[in-house]
Image (cartoon, rainbow, N blue to C red):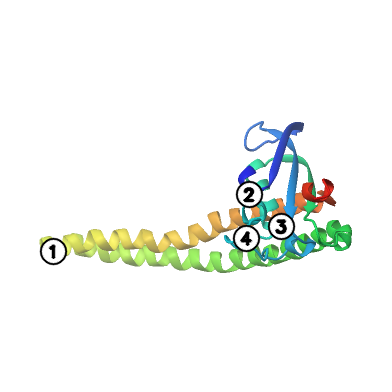
Amino acid sequence: MEASGVRVECTPGRGRTLWPPLRRRNDVAITLPLRTADDLFKDPDVDPFSPGYERYGDRPGIDVISGVLRIERPVSSVHTTVELAAGFDEAPGAQAGDAVRRYCHVKIADLEQELREIRRYGAWALVLGFLAVLVLNAIARTLDSSDDNTLQSISQGVQVASWVVLWFPVNLLVYDRWYARRDQAIYEEMLKMDVSVVPGRDRASGS
């Protein structure tokens, strides 16, 4: 994390989680250097030819924060300090906390819509998947009863195909749903996050 300029400090917080079993929650402090307050939500206008590329990276600050929280979960509290670079007005940063909360509200609503779609289409896909398994296994049993080695080989392939067909709805309802729930939980943590904006180290030193 140091290489990109982002600094993360974790200290044991209050409480433990039920899952993962009894894992202690952390208090997380993130220090995030940005060129401008706009870089909190936009890709920084830097490239590998820029001297500040290693410090500021090429991802929006909000994505950096959510990435840290994915790694450090579970958390009991989060505080983010935004360090603005020299030569940039920090006035927009005064509303950074409100901007982050608005962003998180929209993301949570988008993920809730995505979850509804997953449940709807996943349920239909699961029904169709089970029907496909029944039909393909019936075909496989018919082929397997033949004395022809080629048909028996085809039977094995059809059996494998039947379970591959079923994997799509299982993946949708289990893993895609889990990822959406995880991201929702991260944005909910960011809703409660304290955000402060300070001059960067280069500004504070007067250089």
Question: Looking at the image, is 178 positioned above or below residue 134?
Answer: above
**For the residues carrying marks 3 and 2, which lies nearer the camera in this image?**
2
- Write down the residue under mark 1: 150
Q: Residue at x 59, y 55 (%)?
A: 179
Whether residue 145 is visible here, answered yes or no, is no
How busy is the neighbourhood of tag 4: few (under 14 within 10 Å), some, or many (20 plus)? few
Residue 121 located left or right of residue 39: left
What's the residue type where badge 4 is placed? Ser
Please state which of residues 149 and 26 is positioned toward the viewer in this rendering. Answer: 26
Dot placed on the residue nearer the N-terminal end, 3 or 4: 4
Give the total of numbered labels: 4
Q: Quadrant of residue 142?
A: bottom left
Q: Quadrant of the N terminus?
A: top right
Per the rendering, the mark at residue 62 is 3
- Write down the residue under mark 4: 50
Per the rendering, the mark at residue 4 is 2
| Residue 67 placement (x, y as % from top left) | 64, 51
**For the residues carrying marks 3 and 4, which lies nearer the camera in this image?**
4
* Secondary structure of residue under mark 4: loop
* Secondary structure of residue under mark 3: helix
Q: CA distance from mark 2 to mark 4?
A: 13 Å
Q: CA distance from mark 3 to mark 2?
A: 14 Å
Dot placed on the residue nearer the N-terminal end, 2 or 4: 2
* Secondary structure of residue under mark 2: helix
**For the residues carrying marks 2 and 1, which lies nearer the camera in this image?**
2
Dot placed on the residue nearer the N-terminal end, 2 or 1: 2
What's the residue type where badge 2 is placed? Ser
